Each structure stands twice: as structure tokens, then as C-alpha cells.
Image (cartoon, helix red, strand yellow):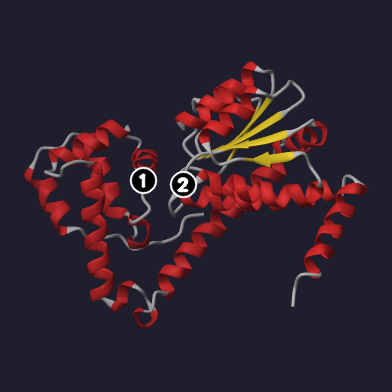
Amino acid sequence: MTLDMPAISIDTLEARALAVRLHPTERRIVEELLAIAPYEVGTMTSSDLSERSGASRSSIDRLSRKLGYAGLKDMRRALALNAGRRIEGTSQELGRGGDGSDIATRVMGSIATRAMAFAEALQTGDELETLVSILLSARSIQLFGAGESSAACSAIHVRLVRLGLPISFHEEYHTQVTLASLMQPSDVAIAVSHSGSTRSTHHALSAARQQGAQIVLLTGKPGSVLSQLADLVIQFPSGRYPGSGEVIDRILAMGLAEVLFQNLVVRRDEFLSNSVRIDDAFDEERL
């Protein structure tokens, strides 16, 4: 499913592209830049652009310099500023009355599209059932993630700890590596990384692997460096879906937390009992 999105007309970028001789790969990158919807520009990463254009990140950076920008960040900043000016100056860019409703529809539609693709993948594959079995047999479960992926780790932890699972998450990098180094073969390490190449997460998973722990990776990039360490890889939908992959992957990871919760709570009576007891405890605190 592909959403019909308006393209950004970027006169400056078009003019710069016409002023230099571009190779086929560079022309493809420029075409992708010109096709980015306004609401995506602010969150578009070099990884997203690389995936869309099929070009390496180094090729994209070289192109930005060839077009007269200081680098990829400078070019992205120029795109964002131009998109912002067009949105402010033209109510048609936003849809009904220029109140942002069109942007809201496109962003939420993008999330829904990716969520349904993810649900279908979980339904047709055996990864979900495998992960549930792994969690049920784990002596302890450690979550690993850096930067914005740590928000997804926190969401998974907050949801599953209510069942009484032996699960924990510590955001601080040195603590993650310390805990990974203390893991055992009966333990499970769950890592969240959109790129599958986060250096600090790789360090922690390498330590966990050395201790014989099972490794589960939640990622948007197949065949990544981190996937080579994993026993189980759950991939978020990638490809030419609209919206920033990195942002929506974090949302899908939080959705997966609820999927796991609902799958686990029906497996053991004590999980349901723990969840009800916690809900009751919170009810006493509500006004």
C-alpha cells in the first residue's frame, strides 16, 4: 500500500542539480529528495534516504557537497527550512484551512500502514511464537538500546514487568555492558536498534553473546551487524513505506510490547494474577 503524497518543489536544490553534472546514482538521490513529503523532511535520516534511493550514505554525503552544501546535515537543514516556509505560506499544503490536519492525517496514516504490515508479518511468520517461548523459559531478560531506541526498551520493560517477568532495563551505557557481562546461557538479551548497527548496543550484545545468552534483535534493517549476533531477528516493515522509518519503528516496538503482553498473560495464571494485582494497586492511588 502506498499513500499518494505531494512532492516538495525545491527550486534551490533543482537549480543546484542542474548546474552540475550528475551520475545516475546522484540523479536518483536528487529525485528522492524532491519526492519527500513536507512532513517527513524534519525526521528524514541519511539511513532513510539511503534505503529509498538505494545509494550508500557516503554517496549521499558526497552529493550534498557536490551541490554546494557543507554536508548532508546542511542539505537536510535547507530542505527543512524550505518546507517550513512553504507550509507557512500556502494553506493548500496543509489541507483544510492550513491547520495541520493534512499533516496529521498523513503521519497517522503512515503509522497505520506500517502497523498493519507488521501485524501481517507477525501473523504469518513464526517469530512471535518463538519470542514468546523464549521469554517464558528465560531466567532473566535484559533490554538493550541506545539513544531514542531506549524509549522503546523502556516501554517494553514497563509493560512486561507487570506480568512478573524477570525483565529489566537500564538506560546508562556502562550499566548495560556490565549487566550483559554477567548474563548466563539461560538469560535473554533483547536489543532494539533501527539501523542494526548501533555501536554501544553492539558492545553490550557482544558481551552477552560471550556469556552464552540468547540474543533477540528488533530492527528495521535486515542483514545488519547486530543481526549477525542474534538468535532471533524480528524485523519492522521496511522498504518504501511513507514516514520516517526510524521514528515509526519505535512506535511499532511499543506496539509489540502490548502484543507480547497479551500473548503472555493468557499462558500462565500467575501472569494474569500479577497484572490484576498491580491494576488494583494503582486503582487505590487514583482520585
Neighbor class of circle 1 (other Cα within 10 Å; few <14, some 14-19, many 20+) is: some
Using the rendered image of the protein, determine whether residue 237 is visible from the camera's viewpoint.
Answer: no
Closest to the observer, 213 or 235: 213
Percent x, y for residue 263?
A: 79, 48
Q: Could you tell whether 192 is left or right of 287 in the image? A: left
In what element is the residue under mark 2? helix
Which quadrant of the structure image shows residue 97? bottom left
Q: Quadrant of the C terminus?
A: bottom right
Q: Amino acid at mark 2?
A: Glu
Q: Could you tell whether 266 is left or right of 23 in the image? A: right
Residues at marks 2 and 1 touching, judged by CB atoms closer than 8 Å: yes
Using the rendered image of the protein, determine whether residue 173 is visible from the camera's viewpoint.
Answer: yes
Picture layout, residue 188 above or below residue 165:
above
Residue sticking out furthest to the right: 269
Report the label total: 2
Percent x, y for residue 90?
A: 26, 76
Q: Could you tell whether 151 is left or right of 129 in the image? A: left
Q: Amino acid at mark 1?
A: Thr
Picture layout, residue 205 above or below residue 68:
above
Closest to the observer, 67 or 116: 67
Residue designated by label 1: 45
Percent x, y for residue 235?
A: 58, 38
In what element is the residue under mark 1? loop
* Residue at screen point 48% across, 30% down: 200
* Residue at screen point 80% across, 34% down: 133
Residue designated by label 2: 246
Q: Earlier in the sequence, mark 2 or mark 1?
A: 1
Which quadrant of the structure image shows residue 129? top right
Q: CA distance from mark 2 to mark 1?
A: 8 Å
Q: Could you tell whether 62 is left or right of 237 in the image? A: left
